[in-house]
Image (cartoon, rainbow, N blue to C red):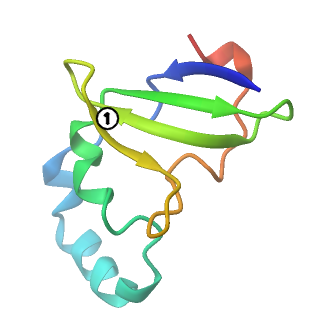
Amino acid sequence: MNYGYTKLFTNWTKEEMNRPLVRFLYFIFYFFKANPDNEKYYPQVKKWLIEIDDDGQVIREIGLDVEGNPLFSSPNNRNWGFLRTLRIDSKLMN
């Protein structure tokens, strides 16, 4: 296992999350949300703490705010995880 952090995917804004098209898609896919409890915090995430396996698959993630406080962690019983579908090269981690 490897542990580290990345600042990839930390550029979400509330305006982008509230665009009419995004809201429409949330409405259509409401029952298929992968992270229903965590999505509202994405605009606040400034750094991700991650655990990846030897193949680069993300196993766990913790979203941190600008002060380094944890906002959420995934996966759990209701949230699949935002980065779990990615393979991350350890060179991208700090």
* Percent of width and height locating residue 68: 27, 20
* Percent of width and height locating residue 61: 51, 39
41 left or right, relative to 63: left
Badge 1 crowding class, 10 Å Cα cut-off, few under 14, some 14 to 19, many 20 or more, is few
Residue 71 makes an appearance in the image: yes
What residue is shown at x 24% (from left), y 26% (from top)?
69
Residue 10 makes an appearance in the image: no
Q: Is residue 17 above or below residue 70?
A: below
| Residue furthest right as drawn | 55
In what element is the residue under mark 1?
Answer: loop
Residue identified by numbered label 1:
11
Residue 56 found in image quarter: top right
36 left or right, relative to 4: left
32 left or right, relative to 55: left
Which quadrant is the C terminus positioned in?
top right
- Residue type at mark 1 is Asn
